[in-house]
Image (tube, coloured by chain):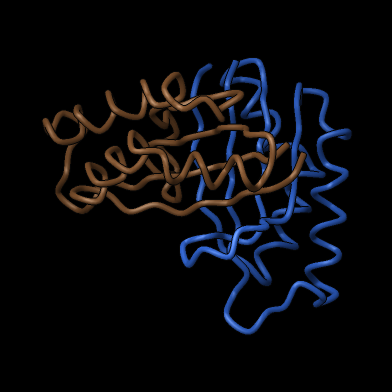
Chain colours: A blue, B brown
Amino acid sequence: MIRHLVLFKLNEGVSHDDPRVSAGVAAFTALGGRVPEVESWEFARNLSDRSNAYDYAINAAVADRDALRRYADHPDHQAGVALWREFATWVIADYEF
Amino acid sequence: MIRHLVLFKLNEGVSHDDPRVSAGVAAFTALGGRVPEVESWEFARNLSDRSNAYDYAINAAVADRDALRRYADHPDHQAGVALWREFATWVIADYEF
């Protein structure tokens, strides 16, 4: 199994109640149920006020690297990424578990 | 339950086989079993070659915010953080699940 982690940081000046953020949150909240390769899915808003805290996180699991590639290529994933590109940056880590 | 995610990036010029990295990896590999508050623990090296991929990740779960505070204050956690400060930076996200 491969774990796929993503931490998102809103761009400077973008607030959580920006309608673009709301649309992006809705897209990623639903995404786990729309991509068959996703075996577990958590998408959530950060609650830490530490200075190195990012704003949102994805914590997902897929079977293997092929499944991760199909997830990345899925049109609903691509559409969500296009939304988030407008107001956030992110970093990732993938690992076997 | 609270999920605690940490993504670590090695500083410029630091390689995975740097002995400081080996010591830090050993410390965080063992940490989950040393802190009573930790209910699930994954610490792993990233396998993605994407440009926004960080190098290591912690994916842990604790009961609540008090447990997260006790985890953060635990001497073994503090000792691990002190090691990692010498060769890496990191970002975090915590969320309820």
For image coordinates 70% across by 32% down, the residue present is A71
Provide residue A42's location: percent of width, then percent of height.
Answer: 75, 38
Q: How many marks?
A: 0
B48 vs B6, nearest the viewer: B6
Judge by depth and name the residue closer to the eye, A28 or B38: B38
Left or right: where does residue B84 sit relative to residue B46?
A: left
Q: Nearer the viewer, residue B22 or A2?
A: B22
Q: In the image, residue A55 lies at what x, y percent?
A: 63, 61
In-image side of A60 versus B41 (left or right): right
Percent x, y of residue B18: 12, 33
Q: Residue at x 67, y 22 (%)?
A: A62
Quadrant of the rendered image containing residue A89: bottom right
Quarter placement of the N terminus of chain A: top right
Q: Splitting the image into 4 quarters, where does residue B21 fall?
A: top left
Residue B19: quarter of image: top left
The residue sitting at 51% across, 51% down in the picture is B92
Q: Is residue A3 left or right of residue B26?
A: right
Q: Is residue B77 above or below residue A82?
A: above
Q: Which residue lies most toward the left here? A: B19
Residue at 25%, 51% in the rendered image: B85
| B26 w.r.t. A59: above or below | above
**Residue A44: x %, y % from top left:** 74, 49
